[in-house]
Every structure is written in structure tokens, then in C-alpha cells.
Amino acid sequence: MNIPESLRYTASHEWVRAESDGTLSVGITDHAQDSLGELVFVELPEAGRRLAAGDACAVVESVKAAADVYAPVAGEVVARNDALAEAPNQVNKDPYAAWLFRIKPAEGAFPENLMDARTYRKSFSEA
Amino acid sequence: MRRTPLYDAHRAANAKMVEFAGWEMPLHYGSQIEEHHAVRRAAGVFDTSHMLALDLEGTAARQFLRHALANDVERLRLPGKALYSCLLAEDGGILDDLIVYRLAEDRYRIVLNAATARSDLAWLERLRPAGASLRARHDLAMLAVQGPRAREKCWAALPELRAASEALGVFFGAQAGDIFVARTGYTGEDGFELLLPAGRAPDAWRRLHDAGVRPCGLGARDTLRLEAGMNLYGQDMDSSVTPFECGLAWSVALEGPRTFVGKQALARHTTAQRMLGLVLEERAGVLRSHQAVHGAHGEGMITSGSFSPTMNASIALARLPAACEPGERVQVTVRDRPLAARTVQPPFVRRGMILV
């Protein structure tokens, strides 16, 4: 299972990447895409939407099942990856390149409190 | 969990394995959507060894099946001819669906679903008269080779099949040495189903693979059968419904004086619901089983829903009010939102062509 060291992770299998402009890119992990199977539909939050940490804000659907994607931290959606609408299986092919949306974290949001790669790997290999 | 003779071949091909009806089966070998397209466009092979073949033999075999099955084996005039039928309970509820082949005057072969094989066998054993024997063929493996190029690739991989199967009509089977080859399937494409000694299955699988037939898993099998408008037992039908609620009235031979298990109940039965297909008209989700359907004639429910790779749209089978007709607009509740769909007469796709 591919779990890049450079990213942060949630217990609900989102990955988070800090961008140079201070925003956070959010996607689903290799483990998540592998469990779901090939994606055939994604629903992404609109730019401008304000999210609390843990809000269900996107949906990914595979041939087999639908799954919610949760906001890893509080903040405002500043972009969404519209290219996925036509090619949702990009998430399967390269889960860490196929970001779903970007958040500008709210004041007092601490993405550094999310799991690092080692902790994330342990979290589901023990489950 | 039980394993088929091809378990090692699946693992070697990096299949994602899942539990299905007590068997450890391949879900896909990397991409179930590409496997689906391979069957629509060229050829794919499925391990269906979890299904159970039953051989019936004896002077009373024909009468036995005429009594046990909702369809009438008397329709099988020619040797090798196959028939689709439901196995019904006395109340008309569906215990299973099956294919029966007439091998000879007093010999038949039935193929049963994996999940129901054990209970079917017990049920049939109770109905079995003297003069008919019943033998479960746990010694056989089963492969389904499906797609527009399936037959030619089968002959390239297994040349010994050609003579017996070249002139085989659709829904006929024949014995070719120790392999029973039938022109049947569960995908809506041409092809063969092969029943062969378990020990020969790995070699046949390898030869088919070397001939360019793509290994396909249960994932592609499900989207292919859904596009073909074929019911899945346990999902689109079970013992709580009769064939009339499942689009299977054509498979019940009610005419004539023949009595069969469930006939009296069906004769009294009034059907409030029917099976129709749905095509989702908005790209806003995926149709799934148990989603509620709302239309001008009342409420219904999806029994099987998924994404159709051939149509690049979401499709479903749904049990709807009997007054509902193909071509109507309905709403389906998908993740708490009403989405627009239209009703269609299945199949959605046959022989590579979109029909709805």
C-alpha cells in the first residue's frame, strides 16, 4: 500500500497536502481507492463553501459502493478538481495526484495534528 | 471458505479475492471496467466453478423435472437443448433459477447457483421419484468464455472442442470428450460455458489466457448481466416473490394439464408489481439496490443498480407498480435527493449493442 511520507492522513482515509500558498489539498488514500474499487462518479464541494472539521463534503462512488469524503480541518473550499467529473478513475490510477478539493484552513485549524504516514499505516493495519 | 481448482491461477494473476456464497472468488484482476469491455468487444473468461452441476438420470427423470420446474422440459425436443427455469416453492416463491440441458431421452443436466445449491439439492431430493437418480457433480469445474470472439478463441485454445461445438446453436450443449460445452452464458454476448473435470481446469484456463481471452471477475460478471437485463438470485428475486414480479412470466409454462410445484399458487396469484429497467438521466450519482422509486403509478424499489460501462450511465432493475410502462419518467432517491430516471424494457445491452 502506497502511503507517502510527505502527507498527513485522517482516520477516514483522506490525505492532506500543504501547498505553498497555505491551502490544503485533499484526496482519498490508496487504501481507500483500493477498497472502493474503480470510481465512476465524484461529487465535489463548490468553491466558497465553509466547512467544519469532519463535515461530509464530497462523495466518491465506485461500481460497488458510495462513500463520503470528510473535511480534514475547518476552512473554506477554494478549488475543486473538475477534471475528475469526466475521469473519476484518475483517483484509482494515481490517488495522490488526483486531489478532490482545496481548503483554506480556518484560523485555529491545525492540520499538523493529523496523522503522519507511520501512524496512518498502523491505524488500519491494526484494524 | 471453499476454493475452486483455479484458486492458484487467480492468486498468480493478482486477483482481488472476495467471499461469495462461501467461496473465495476473484472480484477483478485489476480493472473490472476493462474486463467488462473485453467481454463486450472481444472475449473474457470467468471461473464459475462455484456453481453446481447436477446430473439426473432414469426413466422417471423427465416426469421428475416436469413436476419440479416451473418451465416445461417437454419443450426440449432436441438432445443438447437448454431451458431456463425457476425452481418454485408450493406458494410460488422462487427458490432458485437454473439452466437444464437435455442430454438424452432420460438424462438431464442442471446448473444451480452457488448460494442455493445445497438447499436446492435437498429440495430436489425430497421431490425425486423412484426411477430417477440425482448426482451432484462436485468433480466438475466450470468456465464461462464470453464475447464476440469467444468461440473462435475457445477453438484456438482447445481445438478438441471444435468438432462438437462448431455447429452448436444458441442455448444448446454437447459433449466433446470429457468437456461439456454449451452455447450459453450470463453476459448477453455469444460464447460458451464449459463443464470439465476439475483437474483439467487450470490447463484450460492457461490455454484460454494464452489465446488472448481476458480473465474476468465477479465484478464484471455483475455489470454484464445487469446490462443484459438478467436477474441475480438473492438480489432481484428470492422466495418472497413469484416469477411474475421478476419479469420471468415467459419462463413459466402454465398452459396445459401439467401440474408442477407452485402452479396452484401462481394460478391464484394477482401481480401488483412488475420488473422494469431504469436509466438514470442525470450524472449525479449511481443507482443502487434498495433505493426508492417514485412515479405516477406509485412507489417501487431498485433491486440491482450499478454503473453501465457500455452506456457510460447508471442503470438498474426495479420492481415497480404493475401499471408502470417502459418510457415513463420516475424519480429515484439517491443519497436523499430525487434524481430523474426513465423506465425501459430490459435488456439494456445485447451483443455489444445498446438497445434502450
Image (cartoon, rainbow, N blue to C red):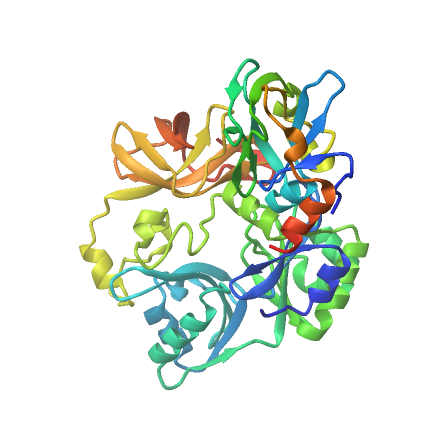
- In the depicted structure, whether residue A119 falls above or below residue B257: above
User: Farthest front residue?
Assistant: A108
Find residue B185 and report its horizontal and vertical position in percent. 57, 54
At a point 29% along the width and 67% down the height, the residue shown is B260
Whether residue B348 is visible to the viewer of this picture, yes or no, is yes
Q: Quadrant of residue A46?
A: top right
In percent of width and height, residue A52 lies at 51, 25
Query: Is residue B254 depicted above or below B199 in this figure?
Result: above
Lateral position of residue A58 relative to residue B60, left or right: right
Figure check: B197 above or below A28: below
Q: Is residue B344 above or below residue B24?
A: above
The front one of B332 and B350 is B332
Work out whether residue B178 can be spotted.
no
Residue farthest to the right, as pictured: B210
User: Residue B319's spot in the image, x, y percent?
Assistant: 34, 42
Residue at screen point 24% across, 47% down: B271
Q: In which quadrant will I find the N terminus of chain B?
A: bottom right
**Which of B25 and B275 lies nearest the eye of the viewer?**
B25
Across the whole image, how many numbered discs are drawn on residues? 0
In the displayed orientation, state which residue is furthest to the bottom: B130
Q: Nearer the viewer, residue B79 or A68?
A: A68
Q: Is residue B120 left or right of residue A121?
A: left
- B237 left or right of B218 in image: left
Q: Residue at x 71, y 28 (%)?
A: A17
| Residue B121 occupies quadrant | bottom left
- Image coords of residue B226 (percent x, y): 50, 44
**Observer-nearest of B103 and B207:** B207
- Residue that sits furthest to the left in the current view: B268
